[in-house]
Image (tube, rainbow, N blue to C red):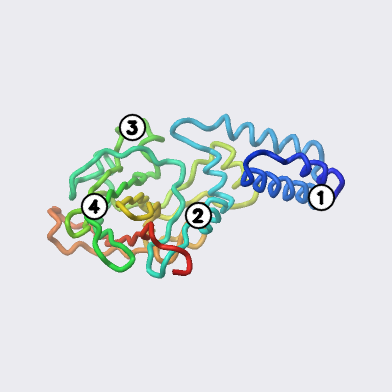
Amino acid sequence: MTPLLRQVLSQVDGPDPRINEIVSALVTHLHAFVEEVRPTEREWIAGLDFLIRTGQMCTPDRNEFILLSDMLGLTTAVDDVNHVGPEGMTPSSVEGPFHSPAPARDLGAWISFGPERDRAVPTVVHGRVLDCDGTPLPGALVDLWQANDTGLYDTQDDTQDAGNLRGLFTTDADGRYWFRTIRPSSYPVPTDGTGGELLHAIGRHPMRPAHLHYRVTAAGHRPLTTHVFLAGDPYLGSDAAYAVKDELVCHPRPGTGGWDMDGPYEEIAFDLKLVSLDWKDGQ
């Protein structure tokens, strides 16, 4: 430990022990980074400017810091240490920067109301919300959001009405949910800000594999934020957000009828298993 680091750490003595622990660890790792990399003064100022411009990119509908966290795998790393659970639980995944409140919709409702509905493959998404023992959870709230077929969420695209491709559903007595939408497609994360600068600088593509976002809540159970990814997508192995987990990959299949659909369509079936609030690690 350098004399400077020892001096800095000696001054970390606030009333909250957890804050002291976090700040001490952060300072220690940052000083080690400087010792290892030996950045020039110009490089250090450029890094600070990068963070300033990241903050300036943030709006109520876009958080560039979340995007950077995703692009560095940090969001998934934090997610992994916070969401352990019993075998069979549905893994969590990153929320991403584009969640916003969804309109409540009846089971079976369409969530697509724009021109993408005429362009993309109609799709029925259905499944159940269960506990980890397989017991259905009626009355669970299933919050869904996705991008359109050109890779844009409603908050990014002035041509989409607010709430397009979003829905808040309540599971029925058997824990079932279902809705109608379009087949999600792969798309690039925004590259017009510092996140794009970082990807370009380190030689990475900006693509995310096709997916749906879920946020599920049920009384007595841990809230779950996760994705459903489509099997066969070329970017499953190189997701820009490092969010793909094998258990979250689903295989769309040709529609088999019974969902009040006209013409050809696809089905995506996905059950979600939530962890009880009573569960303890090692139980």
Q: Is residue 64 left or right of residue 110?
A: right
Residue 244, percent from left and from top: 46, 59
Which residue position is annotated with label 2? 79
Which residue position is annotated with label 1? 35
Disc number lying in front (2 or 3): 2
Mark 2 surroundings: few (<14), some (14-19) or many (≥20) residues within 10 A: some
Disc number lying in front (3 or 1): 1
Please name the amino acid that badge 3 sits on.
Answer: Thr
Please name the amino acid that badge 1 sits on.
Answer: Glu
- Residue drawn at (56%, 53%), measured in percent from left and top? 73
The secondary structure type at the circle numbered 4 is strand
Q: Is residue 55 left or right of residue 277?
A: right
Residues at marks 3 and 1, CA–CA distance in whole angstroms: 50 Å
Is the Cβ of the residue at disc 2 closer than 8 Å to that at disc 3? no
- Nearest to the observer: residue 141 or residue 95: 141
Mark 4 surroundings: few (<14), some (14-19) or many (≥20) residues within 10 A: many
Please name the amino acid that badge 4 sits on.
Answer: Pro
Q: Sequence order check: which comes first, mark 3 or mark 1?
A: 1
Q: Sequence order check: which comes first, mark 4 or mark 3?
A: 4
Q: Is residue 240 visible?
A: no
The secondary structure type at the circle numbered 1 is helix
